[in-house]
Amino acid sequence: MNGTFPESVEVFKRKTLRFIHLAGTVWFMLCVGYVLALALHQAGVRWWVLFSLSGHGLLLAFILMSLYLFAIFRGVSSSSQMHQIEHPLTSTGFYTAFYVTIPFLGGLAGCLAMIGVCTIVRQFFQGIALGTLAATFLVWVIVDPAAGVLEVWLSGGARRHRARRVAEAKLLREKEHEERERLLADILENEDRQRREWAELLKPQAEKLADLLRAERIDFEAAERQAADIGASAWRIGGIGCMRLLREMAIEICKGKEGGRTFVDYISVWWDGIGNWRNPSVPRTASP
């Protein structure tokens, strides 16, 4: 029970920060849209044109905000020991709370700055929006990245921890690469050993196929039946790979015995339709 309560509090804090950050981002986008629309209207653009463009603008803003929140939520909700060691300042709860509430703090600062200075409602809202934009840009784009870099390089422990983490990640990538290379080498070795076994087993069938190709007067139907039986046997042994090897062996034997004379490769025709074998010289169309 004692261990569950602190964990529940921590989960509640992370969820609260996520919600505040989402609300702050929405507020920031609304301020950007307001300033942009006001600037276009002051430049002479009609309101109905602005409303016609708002649909595409809202879609684009939603996509950009989703991508931004996807990238930022991991940092907001991060509580790993590694993150805390490398970022002792920006990982604290006070800094995180300041980071996610800065759009509202900027709007509040703009509101206080406009009190007693401006009596026009539109300019008052414009001051709030500009305060939000300025504060958010300053913290999210300038201060936060600079603080993240400085806290790593000014802290010796954080710098050493980061260097060790980068070295471990590099070593892990090298091990994974070596493992992939080893697996590939094993696969190639197994394939080569299998081809040697097939070659030894299929040598008599290759001789028969070569004799069928070399016959001057050939009963095509009888030869096709014999070749089909040989091809089906090769398919049962090792599939399409075994059939390709058997064909290559038969053609090599035939070339050696013919002494350079030309001959017709009937094997592709004889084996058409056996397993996955297809005659490449016969065009095929899709079935209706």
Image (spheres, grey):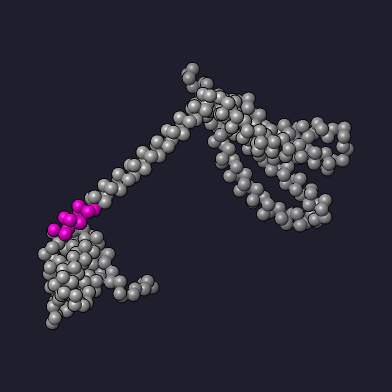
Single out the residue that lies furthest toward the left.
Answer: 204
Give left or right: position of 176 versus 77. left
Q: Which residue is at 59% across, 32% downward?
A: 149
Q: Nearer the viewer, residue 45 or 52?
A: 45
Is residue 192 magenta-colored? yes
Q: Is residue 167 magenta?
A: no
Which residue sits at x=23%, y=50%? Answer: 190
Q: Nearer the viewer, residue 15 or 255?
A: 255
Question: Residue 260, how many percent across, how many down?
Answer: 19, 75
The residue drawn where x is 76% and y is 45% is 35
Location of residue 81 with respect to 135 vertically, above or below: above
Kindly indicate the quadrant of the structure image that contains residue 141.
top right
Number of residue marks: 0
| Residue 217 on image: x %, y % | 13, 82
Outermost residue toward the front in this view? 259
- Left or right of 137? Residue 74 is left
- The answer to whether residue 38 is seen in the rendering is yes
**Of the pair 259 and 244, the residue shown nearer to us:** 259
Q: Position of residue 135 (x, y in %)?
A: 72, 35
Q: Residue pushed farthest top?
A: 2
Magenta residue span:
191-200
Q: Is there any visible trace of residue 23 in the rendered image?
A: no
The C terminus lies in which quarter of the figure? Answer: bottom left
Q: Position of residue 66 (x, y in %)?
A: 59, 44
Q: Is residue 265 left or right of residue 33?
A: left
Tell me what residue is drawn at x 68 percent, y 54 percent. 55
Which SS does the magenta portion mostly show?
A: helix
